[in-house]
Amino acid sequence: QKYRMSRESLSKLCNLVKDHEAFNPNSRTRQQTNPKHQLMCLLVYLSCEGSGASNPMLRSLFRLGRGTFDNFKKRCIRAIIDCLADKYLNWPTEGERTEIARRFKNDFGWPNLVGIADGTLLPLAFQPETDDAPDYHGRKYRYSLSVLVINDDKRRIRYFLAGWPGKTHDNRVFRNSKVAKKPTEFFRPNEY
């Protein structure tokens, strides 16, 4: 419960990323902490908000120093992105887009539709430590990030653009996405 993941899912995730260079599996230097333990630290951090996600609280829970806890988080995020992004986050191939468009047409009557885009806000637990922190102060949450998400008919995320301050309008985020700037890389004629 603390990790927001079952033991089986944690083991599966660990097996997918444990050999990443971030964990030095073949290094002759000092051995790092087990990758599963490092993942557990990251998962607790991601599952908390407010004062529960504070570095002192989590460092105390895991009995780690500030630098060690930060290194665990950075290593795990890098390993997860490097090992899983290509497999789990990709734009549909031409054949997949044909199939997605067929399902959208059958289910909703919309021809040539291959994805649905929407903007959302991700609340931040703390004020960003940047000069433009007031820009992250949004209308729904105290501080947030604006995110563009495009998913297919099965609700699988196929593209996202994150990191814009919470005050940024959805249309501005979309206009600055690769999908809007280079549509021919994502769509055939008549697809949308």
Image: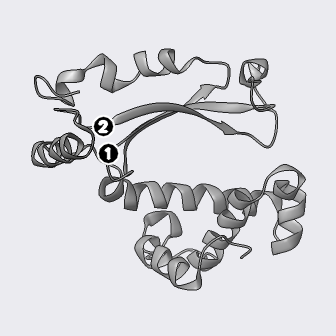
- Classify 179 as above or below 22: above
> Residue sitting at 51 percent across and 78 percent down?
9
> Residue sitting at 61 percent across and 75 percent down?
32
Which residue in the protein does label 1 denote?
A: 152
> Residue sitting at 58 percent across and 84 percent down?
7
Contact? badges 1 and 2 (CB < 8 Å): yes
Left/right of residue 33 with respect to residue 79 in the rendered view? right
Q: Closer to the camera, 118 or 133?
A: 118
> Residue sitting at 65 percent across and 77 percent down?
37
**Three-letter code for the amino acid on which mark 1 is drawn:** Asp
Q: Is residue 47 visible?
A: yes
The part of the image, by quadrant, that contains residue 160 is: top left
The part of the image, by quadrant, that contains residue 74 is: bottom right
- Screen quadrant of the C terminus: top left
Residue 138 in picture, x, y percent from top left:
74, 24
Left/right of residue 93 with respect to residue 119 in the rendered view? left
- Screen quadrant of the N terminus: bottom right
Q: Closer to the camera, 99 or 161?
A: 99
Q: CA distance from mark 1 to mark 2?
A: 5 Å
Say which element carries label 2: loop
Residue 5 in picture, x, y percent from top left:
60, 74
Left/right of residue 83 with respect to residue 128 in the rendered view? left
Residue 100 in picture, x, y percent from top left:
20, 46
The part of the image, by quadrant, that contains residue 61 is: bottom right
- Classify 18 as above or below 52: below
Which residue in the protein does label 2 denote?
A: 115
**Three-letter code for the amino acid on which mark 2 is drawn:** Gly
